[in-house]
Image (tube, coloured by chain):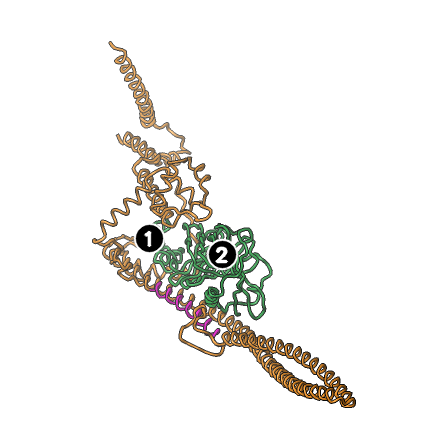
Chain colours: A green, B orange
Amino acid sequence: MYLQVINRPLKITHSFEHTFDNKHVKITCAKKAFLFPVFEVTRDEQIGFLYDGPLGITCDLLVHSKEGAVGKIFEETYSSALFVPANLDFLRDHVKELTPIEEEKFPKYEKIISSFEIHLSSKKFCYHSNNDYFLLLSGRTFSIWFINGETTISITHEEIMGRTGERKLFWFSPKNIVFTNDKGDIFSTSNMFSNKNIVKMILKSLETNPVRDYFSNFDKLLSH
Amino acid sequence: MAKEDVDNLKKEVEELKKQNEELAKLMKNVYKKIEQSSIPPSVPPASEVVEAHTDFSRPLRAQRAPIAPKKQKKLKDKEKRKYEKVLEKDLSKLIKTEKKKGNEVFDTKFHFDTEKFNIQINEIAKKAQEFANKISKNFSSDFMTGLDKKLKKIDTTIAKEADRIRTISVMTDEEYEDIVEEIEEAKEEIEEAKEEIEEYQHQIVEVRQRMNELKREMAKAKERFMNAKLNGDIEEIEETKNHLRDLENELRESGEDLQDSLHYLNDAKREFERARREYSNLLRRAQRLRNVHRQSPKMFVIGASKGKKEDDFSVKIEDLVTSVASNIKKSLVSTIEGGKKIISQITDIDGDKIVITDEKGTRISSGSIEDFITTTAGLFSALGDENRLKVLKTLELGPEFQKELSEKTNLRGGTYKHHTDILQEVDFITREAIRGRYLITQLGIEALKLSELLFLRKKKLEAAQKPTKKDERDDEDETTLDIDIE
């Protein structure tokens, strides 16, 4: 996939905030930011917009579970980003067309778009007819945001996090892997190897043993 | 006498009356028993002598019904054998049996040796540790096998993806070939246009030369005509006239030819320019496709290793995906190793050496006592309020909006803000960034559990200090017994 920017800019008239339907993510677009249509060269179809200007994103990847809140809150700003797809409803009311900018200034945006040449484009992903998803690719600090009616997924160099609905969460980081389900149970690799859990397993295995009476008090103590 | 004194006397009299009544009851009972014991037995008939004799041999107090033995869990045969063996081994050392000579019945005496018991317990602890290690090893091996399966799955998916990418790359190759063909066609077109232009230019030059010749001839014919006029030769005049007319016609024709050829030349030039544009466009597209094939250093790819430059597109993508998969595998392996380290009990858990684990257990190091005191005081001060505990208890069930939480805890305005701020400072609760709901953190839940544990412990201790109903009954029995003996 080869991306090309075209010198037919749009401009954001007033700064605005937009929260997506899943209510996990909020975007803040700045005033006077430019939006350039981005085409794929091989098919001559518009796939999205290049956003040039400060862009803020706040996301609640925080979920309630039996052992307390799991996850974290993202608050980040990007200098440039790529919006996919082209038909974005939330942009319509805040945008006006401009005359093409000077040709001397335009190569800057071609440079930016050359940094987005990512080969993750399966055909279905980019030519999805429905408008129920939103993809955001940041420029310098590499991060991808996939936002849907129910889910949000963020991919960075350090970790991969995702949330669906109210209670489901997954979190891959080099130190730990965490899952939560609808009931509020947590599965994490750090808990898996704790001494307490191993002792619990041993005690459970000794349930039928008459020696269990010796350990009954310990079991009670550990159960709290 | 004052009224108070009279009232006090009355109370004393009532108490004495009560005591008298109780004493009277007791005395009545005592007298009854004495009467029963003092009455001589009536002389029985000769037939009932034996039975009557047995009646006298009964004890005074009725025997209690035997306590039913508790039902024990039925063990399976295998388990029974196992535990019997264990018990025989373990308990045979602790319990000493003694035989009484002459008697057939074995009597047992239990000697509880604390030293041996301690040794035994230590041995059991060692066994438990070994068992834990075994379990951990098995667990990790199971986990690793599961992981291997998953990784194999990932490999298969990677292979599929690679095939798919290969097809895409083949597509790009085909496109590239098409473009090359188009470029060649464009080149041919340009060459044809060039030839045409050259032809037209040649024609124009010829026409112009011809026109110049005609103009010269015209000039000559005009001179001749003028000479003929001066001389008065009518024949020559007519000849020259005809010649001039022919020349004019030729000139007109050649002029028209020139105009036509100029027109054609302009068309050809336009075509040439168009072909050149197409050619340049095609060249650009070809360059871009080449860029797709060869990864330029500016390109930004997930997990791409810098410095490597390969022409084959499909192989590169495979490498990328495998590198990502290997990274994930490494991270998983590192987590497993970390878990194993924790199991093997390393002394310094934290880098700051706050916690020390010895044979005695986990302790806080002497260097960080001040920090411990200040932070724990802050934590317990956050816990030490009814309203805050109420907030934590409500948030334990699930996240709440501000209004709902204030309604449930009966906190409003400034007090609500004050308490929630304190809890947020200590990280017992957090707030969502977008919807603003309050959530209890993992630390908060642990604090709640700790407070509940303290509460239960306190209640247990209180219950142990108070005398129970059973104890009271036992006391009453003791008093009656004393009287019996007397």
Frontmost residue, A143 versus B197: B197
- SS under mark 2: strand
Decide: marks 1, 2 in contact (CB < 8 A)? no
Q: Is residue B320 magenta?
A: yes
Q: Nearer the viewer, residue A160 or B51?
A: A160
Identified at 27% across, 11% down, the residue is: B3
Q: Is residue A32 above or below residue B378?
A: below
Task: Report x, y in % for residue B435.
Answer: 47, 46
Q: Which mark is residue A214?
A: 1
Q: Residue B320 appears at what percent x and percent y?
A: 45, 72
Which one is in front, B172 or B64?
B172
Sequence order check: which comes first, mark 1 or mark 2? 2
Side of B33 relative to A186 (left or right): left
* Residue A189 circle label: none
Q: Is residue B53 above or below residue B352?
A: above
Residue beneath disc 2:
A152
The quadrant holding residue B266 is bottom right
Q: Are marks 1 and 2 on the same chain?
A: yes
Pointer 1: residues within 10 angstroms few (<14), some, or many (20+)? Answer: few
Tell me what residue is drawn at x 40 percent, y 42 percent.
Answer: B393
First to last magenta residue range: B313-340
- Alpha carbon of mark 1 to alpha carbon of mark 2: how far? 50 Å
* Residue drawn where x is 65% and y is 85% of the image: B212
State which quadrant residue B166 falls in. Answer: bottom right
Q: Could you tell me what secondary structure mostly forms the magenta stretch?
A: helix
Question: Identity of the amino acid at label 2?
Answer: Thr
From the image, state whether disc 1 or disc 2 is nearer to you: 2
